Amino acid sequence: MKNPFLKYFLISLSIFVFGLSSYSQQKTYFTKQIINTPPKIDGFLNDPSWDVVEWESGFTQRYPYSGEKPTQETRFKILYDNNNLYVGVRLFDTEPSKIESRLTKRDDFDGDHLNIAIDSYDDNLTAFVFGVNAAGVQSDQLISNDKSSFDRSWNAVYHVKTSIDSLGWVAEYQIPLSQLRFADIEDYNWGLQVVRIDYRKQEFSTWQYVSYESPAWVSGFGDLKGITGIEPRLAREVLHYTVGKIERYKKEIGNPYETGRDNDLSFGLDGKFGVSNDMTLNFTVNPDFGQVEADPSEVNLTAFETFFPEKRPFFVEGNNIFDYRVNDGDGPVPALLFYSRRIGRQPQLSYDEEDDEYVHNPEFTNIIGAVKLSGKTRNGLSVGILESVTSEMNADISLNGNKRRQIIEPLTNYFIARIQKDYNGGNTVFGSILTSVNRQYSQSAMNELPQNAITGGLDFKHFWKDKTYSISAKLFFSHINGTREAITELQEASQRYFQRPDLDHLSLDSTRTSLTGMGGLVHFRKEGNGNFRFGSVINFKSPELDFNDIGYIKDVDRITQTNYVMYQVFKPSKLFKNLNFMFFEWNLFDFGGALFDQGIFSRNEFHFLNNWSFELEFVRQLKSLSRTELRGGPAMLHLNSTQFDLFLRSDPTKKLRFNIRANYFIGDKDFSNINTYRLGIHYQATNALSFSLEPNFLKTRNDVKYVDDVDFGNDKRYLIGTINRKQLGVAFRVNMSLSPNFTIQYYGQPFIFAKKYTNFKRVTDAVADNYNDRFHQFTANEIRYNASSDYYEVDENGDGSGMDYEFENPNSNVFEFLSNLVVRWEYSPGSTLYFVWSQTRSDDNSMGRFDFKDNMTSLFDIYPRNIFLIKFLYRFVL
């Protein structure tokens, strides 16, 4: 057998086709109904009502010593009435003075911790998790698909108090039944799991044992029985908000849009209504996300837009139902049919000011409103539907006192529908998704954008042998309509570059008014039980596939083949808690059959008994034919490269902890070198106050970096150069909690960047076997810099007769400082008051010189833009 990877894969499959079960005997807890007065939630468990049920114990370690007795004992009781579930937990500790009781922001999962997980659907796939740490800070999440999706954005409204005494610590819960989803039947059998995390021991123990190596989680829960006669409680709540905003910045004389001050008062409404026992309707009208932290600074030198994660609460919460990823085995950046940041995005067009004009381009598109219906029925049908409308956006233009407006984003409707159905106890899942975007054209300027776009997909996943093995498949498509201008622009976009002169299997057609593409994947894997995991993926995306009206996709016209194998040691030894070793290989082809990317990757993780860890990654690029380097020019063959990544993390339980990451990229024949260093330092000064500092430094030299393309007679010249790039960013945070419901957070990031080009070249044969035959480097007689115009002038034949063409100086410096102060007070469950101060400093020039002292001085000489915001939210329960 010639292919060693396939041979290894087949051997592994034959050896590990039989797995061992990772479950212990299923436990059952019988609760009782409260007849008289319910317990007072104060964290002491001294109410007589708790005496009607017995203590339940018998916890087992899940990590690090899976299957063994925990270091500390844990007991719990559960009661219920017609409106609430009550949980009391006693967490014993032989050294109560060492309990980590940390006041943090909600959902930080820091310090000694407790989770109550309830599968009220009783579907072995979904669980509502109500967590708390020893300081009383809540942390909740929604688990779906057994263990493949943990949604920490899900926020329940429940009451919990904690206390610390000589025996350890106590947690006392009141969980409204309205926060759970269940059918209207007489007798209930719910899944139950109680999880304790002993922070200083880094020990994870559970009531119902599910081994650390198990591929399942919710399906391994124990049973909660004894609940009868209750009725589902439908959530009915409205959240009204008022936002006052003051903005101060540098005044520009004569510019009516830069007056130095803006004031605004806005109102909005969020709501949540239980449509049925299983379905919930969320809506938002005129939403405001001023309290959300800004994206980190960056300078993007690639042909593709940067992927930033969603942070806006309405779109984050419950977003897992809409998650449809299409890049298994096809790179680290997700390809998504639905990328919620498209809703409210920066306007896609802008107006460039002309002489004597003043222009204001809005930063974001206004969201008029959005509605989201989601839930899951008792028979395993999951539904998610989202509808949103964004307003028409205009650039404001003023010329000699005459004002007008130019549309830069049309009125747009977004629609997403997602359905999944579980069969066979969740071992088989079928699903589908459909999205549409429709834009209202009202000016000819809108011809540059597609008028409507439809995407959709089918998906299937099947598990067998206690979920040890699985096979999944997806088939998806896109169809886009628009004017000739809009469709031509899509063909020429970085995802396709149909205008490339070396393309044989594709061509640019400027008369087209639509694009239709499709893709699919098949993924087989062994997911658990035993030390080995392995898998194989085939993934394809046709040349015309495009999700970017409502989703995110970087690259198409590709067929990806990936094989991987992982070996994990779960049982601690004298030195290690666990070990992980991974190996991947990949090959990428275009739809013409050409191999354009090939490589191998390995990752090795060492987790020590002292809670330190070390990771080493190795990547060897065996072929790299870049189809995007020349921005629509011919594919550029790069030399192969080797990459190392080292990561060291200290003990996370210590008050002072740190991590260090170093990445080294080394191109063959020294054509490129990239060094990246990141340091993370975190200091827990007190249980309520912490500081973190995260500096990062990047230094790059690359001899083949795109500069520009210019016309020369009837030919096109593709210009490249040697880029020297340096970048420094420092993120620092301060978190202070005065109580579990009152937090103060500060985030700041100075950022300086410089890139300087030398050794300019023109591409002669982008795929020549000899590296030096791929380009011609300009001599001193062929190129000169014109300081007055800030352009480089090229006399290609060097005869001194005059300039043949020119290109703009590509050197640059970027300076930016972002900061955000957020004071958050949850004065009543679900009702919150925010005070926010944001400051931005931003500027750039064409110097291309990195000098830390001068650059930092320049950064803080920039006049700041300050935004002060007060946001008041009040929750009405109907």
Image: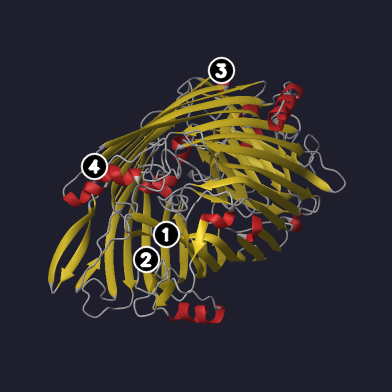
Q: Residues within 10 Å of mark 1 (few under 14, many from 20)?
A: many
Residue at the spot of label 2: 869
Point out the residue furthest to the top here: 424
Pair 4/3: label in front: 4
Counting residues from the start of the chain, the first of labels 4 and 1 encountered is: 1
Amino acid of disc 4: Arg
Q: Which label is found at residue 291?
A: 1
* Location of the C terminus (image quadrant): top left
Q: Which label is found at residue 484?
A: 4
Label 4 and label 2: CA atoms lie apart by 44 Å
* Location of the N terminus (image quadrant): top right
Determine whether label 2 and label 1 are within 8 Å by CB. Answer: yes
Counting residues from the start of the chain, the first of labels 3 and 1 encountered is: 1
Q: Nearer the viewer, residue 526 or 670?
A: 670
Amino acid of disc 2: Leu
Pair 4/2: label in front: 4
Q: Which label is found at residue 424?
A: 3
Q: Residues within 10 Å of mark 2 (few under 14, many from 20)?
A: many
From this viewpoint, is residue 381 visible? Answer: no
Determine whether label 4 and label 3 are within 8 Å by CB. Answer: no
Counting residues from the start of the chain, the first of labels 4 and 2 encountered is: 4
